[in-house]
Image: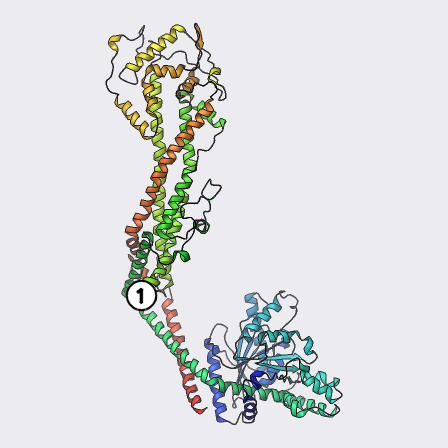
Amino acid sequence: MAMTTGYSGNHPTMQNSVAKYAESIYNSEASKSRYEAYSRLQASAVAFGEKLPIPEIVAVGGQSDGKSSLLEALLGFRFNVREVEMGTRRPLMLQMLHDPAALEPRCRLQEEDSDDYGPVIMPASAVAEAIRVRTEDCLKMLGTAVSAKPIVMRAEYAFCPNLTIIDTPGFVLKGKKGEPENTPDEILAMVRTLAAPKHRLLLFLQQSSVEWCSSLWLDIVKSIDPSLERTIIVVSKFDNRLKEFAERWEVDRYLSAGGYLGDNARPFFVALPKDRNSSSNEDFRRQIATVDTDILRQLSENVAGGFDVEKFGKHIGFGNLRQFLEAELQCRYRHAAPETLSLLDQRCSEVTAELAAADAKISAAADVAALRRLAMIHASSVANHVVALLDGVDSPDPAAWGCTSEEERSESGFGRWPGQVEDVQPVNAGLRLYGGAAFDRVLHEFKCVACSVECPPVSKEKVASILQGQAGRRGGPLEAAFVLAQSAAREWLGPLLDTACNRLVYVLRSLYRLALELELVEDTDAMKTITSDISMYVGFHAALRQAHNTIIREVARRSKDLVHHQLAAIINSFSEVYGCETHLYQSSREGMGTGTGRVRGFHHVSLSLEDSEDQLMTKSEVTDDEVHQDKKQAIVKGCVQSPVRQIGEGTGGGIAESQMTVPETPTPELAAAEARSKEFGIASGRLNGLRDAGQVNAEACGGLKRKRNRRRISGGRAAGAIGLLPSGSGNRGTSIYKEVCLLASEQFGKMREMLVERAVHTLNETFLVPLRNELGINVQLQLFAVSDEKFLDMFVAPGAIEKLEAERMALQKRCNTLHTCLAEFRTLARSL
């Protein structure tokens, strides 16, 4: 054994204690009491998953270094799984219980998913097959080559000590054929976990054929227990090395480990029977004793001078190792008893409290009225905290719980705003905000983004398509510009509204977890008690969160519908203004006809968007007299009371002066048109010009070359297009395409400005007002306006009562067992 500082330095009396305990290990009544007490405590700890610092032994070493054979020798009968060529692929937690009445071994495996143990395995030789089947089933289910889930076996036998030894998978450099490549790493990680607790001893085995200076596994053990303070080193298969010794100095140098294990290291040297065909367990134990005798005889007779018996004699042979393990564990049991008693007392109190909580759960699950009261108070408190966060609070700390604009965009999953190449930086973009502050920042960000959107460029093909398509209506560039502006508004401003709503939803949904934090930080002791009582009901908390999210989604849906309706209304209102302006223009053009009641001289024309107005040619001609007559008709048109006048059929000339009237005030149609024009920024001068017949004639004929006898003018659809160009557009180099784009950009900007102003106000009102006024009420209605049966579904899942009762029974059993162990250890402590 590695006689470490823990044995010889830190505990100077322990070596003497080992010798004394070894002499009276089965004769002392106190020792027997400790065995029985710790055996029951170990069994309870394994069964109930208790983590108590009970002294145990973890066997570690390379594969085929003899760990399983050593366990067989300790048990006093053979059982190892290696006979079915599986090796140990799961930890085997072996509880050895010394029972003088058990003349035949009684072995039982603990059920995989239960605290109970199965029936006694008969005969004992069938233990290997039972372990193999249990191992294969587990590995097949997990799909791995090894598993950290232990197999627990209880062995009661008259020839075994009271020990708990954990046999681990052997270290390997490479997995077997068909095993994953990471099998060695998995085994190493498993062994480290099992050997880490300080109350466990490491029983490290290594074959005698391996030199200490080249031992890979010794380095691993030192990484777990650097000073070897709790490591017992065993050199297995020692009989294979005996033939190499001829003189005493060779034997003594080998037995001293050559200094590689430290000055205090005293490894044990053990050999076990190689013949596995022994007829009975008694023969197996006799063979073990025979091998020990043969080793000592060979060292004494076949080595010149023998060996240092006084120094190394107690560390050679299995009998000495077993005696030391039993004595060492007795010492550790004795020293651990006070701490074990204290921990048992603590665990009994904890388990008793758990049992009381389980009783309370069962009682509460049946008390619907109490559950409703607790749930309603908690839900109302959370809703109030959400409203408080919207109004502005300084707790919890925004620096820890808030988000910057960039984090908000990333976590919400919406990224950049539609159509934006770079992120817009609103006010306080770099500050971590939440609640109402974050809500306002999103609206400001939306405003910045929307105001930066310009009317996108359009192709000449689109403009030509619109102009040609509306030729019969004589809309011209102005109608084309309105169509393009409306289309751009739908395409570019609509997605911005959707993104704004989605971002606001994210800000509002994040308030729920902040409200729960406020519950823990700011509430009174009474509210904290309610929060604690309700915290165990996961189903209720999931339903409460879902109710908040549902309400926010519904508010967002209504808000989104409303802002999109506003966008459509703004677009349609611009269409009405355009229709009024076009109506005035067409009415003015009708006054240019002759007394026959028809508009003369306008026929089909071929239109090019890149031609100047000088190049727009007509296929019909107008004489000077007709031009003079048209001008006269236009003058008369400007003075009549109605903007639309029916021209009499069959009259031979112009209108007589007696038929003319001079209006003192504009007609209602004109007044309405002027009001709409002012609202949407359309210059009222254009409408005044349309009322002025001379101005209409000037716009219709401006920029065209007049000839004395004949003159070419554009007719049909071309005439309508040119007539709608604004005053001053007579510049011969200006194309209709550029004019349409300019007008479209102007109208898009006006739509955008109006939408931003209205949308920001609408989003504020439609999101915040319902949440401030109705969140608590709506949550209460969703969760509590239901039948008791449906209400209990949030607290008690189907079969939950039965599950709670089963858990209570298990706790009751654990509590009774621990209290029995506590009473036993208290009695034991008085005898120490």
Q: How is the image coloured?
A: rainbow
Residue 438 vs 223, above or below: the answer is: above
In x, y percent, where is residue 90?
57, 73
Q: Tally the marks.
A: 1
Residue 712 is left or right of residue 632, and the answer is: right
Amino acid, disc 1: Ile
Tell me the residue at 38%/9% (across/down): 627
In x, y percent, where is residue 718?
44, 18
Q: Secondary structure at mark 1?
A: helix
Residue 129 is left or right of residue 306, and the answer is: left
Residue 381 is left or right of residue 255, and the answer is: left
In x, y percent, where is residue 765?
31, 45
Tell me the residue at 57%/73% (across/down): 191
Mark yes or no: residue 456 visible. Answer: yes
Quadrant placement of the N terminus? bottom right
Residue 254 vs 550, above or below: the answer is: below
In x, y percent, where is residue 146?
58, 69
Residue 387 vs 663, above or below: the answer is: below
Q: Residue 490's image quarter?
A: top left
Front residue of 314/290: it is: 314
Q: Residue 759's image quarter?
A: top left
Mark yes or no: residue 160 visible. Answer: no
Tell me the residue at 50%/85% (across/down): 333
Q: Residue 665's image quarter?
A: top left
Residue with the mark numbered 1: 530
For disc 1, the neighbor class at 10 Å (few under 14, some 14 to 19, many from 20) is: some
